[in-house]
Amino acid sequence: MTEPMPALFVSHGSPMLALDESGAHHFLKGLSRRIGRPENILVVSAHWETGAPTVSTAQEPETIHDFGGFPEALYRLRYPAPGAPALAGETAKLLEEAGLSVSREGSRGFDHGAWIPLMLMYPEAEIPVTQLSIQPSLGPQHHYRLGQALQPLRDRGTLIVASGAVTHDLETFFRSGFTRDSEPPESVDVFAEWVADAVKDARLEDLLDYRARAPHAVQNHPTEEHFLPLFVACGAAGTPLRAERLHNSKAYGVLAMDVYAMH
């Protein structure tokens, strides 16, 4: 019997991840050799926010350039992977069986939280992909529950990619004038290491209550949307949580580019 696919948490950082020759860029380019080729991919991205869980049933999703002020080369990039309507239907069914209300969106394309990591991991763009939205107003416990419902997909060859950020303090970034290679503030390192220890030790209660228990939590996440995908990955891992920190680097001072595999 083959091993289930992992659930990944990927810090997608700046859109320039697609072009910058950074440590995270090169790590993601080699990640597919480590985890193998899935049958299909479900992405839970911080850049698709809805009031209720929503899946994309698009058959030919467009590449969404949902950012501004970057080099023209970034806007020329496309990720023409096919959609995965069948996986979207399976995802919706699992969530509904878990008692969650689910919507379907027929034209949703790939936002940059989805296509930039996937372009590095699977550049051939041949694997069917769909997306599931997040609900920032509903918090960590809700997203952990989403992940729990999605756990059976891993046994069916689906790679779950939860795409967000371990740290995302853009207020400090814009105020401080950091560049790609700026040294991170102590608050970034301390929070990222707290997360790494909590994940490694399966301290789920601490993680779910991170805003009260983690040092510098609110500073690193003034809003929660980029951290919530982590809880989807944790939920999809099942219990006991087994997780591996695959990559750890920093970009632009305030962005911890950690990648985790949940098993």
Image (cartoon, rainbow, N blue to C red):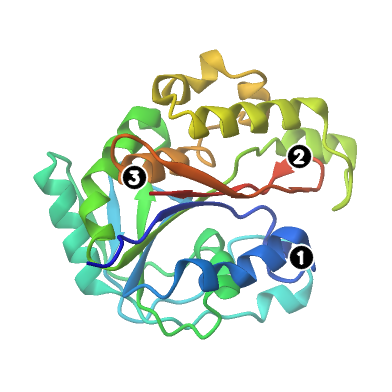
- For the residue labelled by badge 1, is the local secondary structure a helix, a strand or a loop? loop
Which disc, if any, is residue 254?
2
Give the class, few, some or many, for how many residues have Cα within 10 Å of label 3's Cα (few <14, many ≥20): many
Q: Nearer the viewer, residue 26 or 70?
A: 26
Estimate the spatial distance between the alpha carbons at disc 2 and disc 3, rounded to whole Å: 28 Å
Mark positioned earlier in the residue sequence (3 or 1): 1
Estimate the spatial distance between the alpha carbons at disc 3 and disc 1, rounded to whole Å: 36 Å
- Where is residue 122 shown, x and y percent of the image? 52, 77
Amino acid type at mark 3: Ala
- For the residue labelled by badge 2, is the local secondary structure a helix, a strand or a loop? loop
The residue identified by callout 3 is: 237
Which disc, if any, is residue 175?
none
Q: Residue furthest front?
A: 1
- Where is residue 161 shown, x and y percent of the image? 44, 57
Amino acid type at mark 2: Val
Q: Are marks 3 and 1 in contact (CB under 8 Å)?
A: no
Q: Are marks 1 and 2 in contact (CB under 8 Å)?
A: no
Amino acid type at mark 1: Phe
The residue identified by callout 1 is: 70
Q: Nearer the viewer, residue 184 or 171?
A: 184
- For the residue labelled by badge 3, is the local secondary structure a helix, a strand or a loop? helix
Q: Are marks 2 and 3 in contact (CB under 8 Å)?
A: no
In the picture, the quarter occupied by the N terminus is bottom left
Q: Is residue 224 left or right of residue 234?
A: right
Estimate the spatial distance between the alpha carbons at disc 1 and disc 2, rounded to whole Å: 18 Å
Q: Residue furthest left?
A: 97
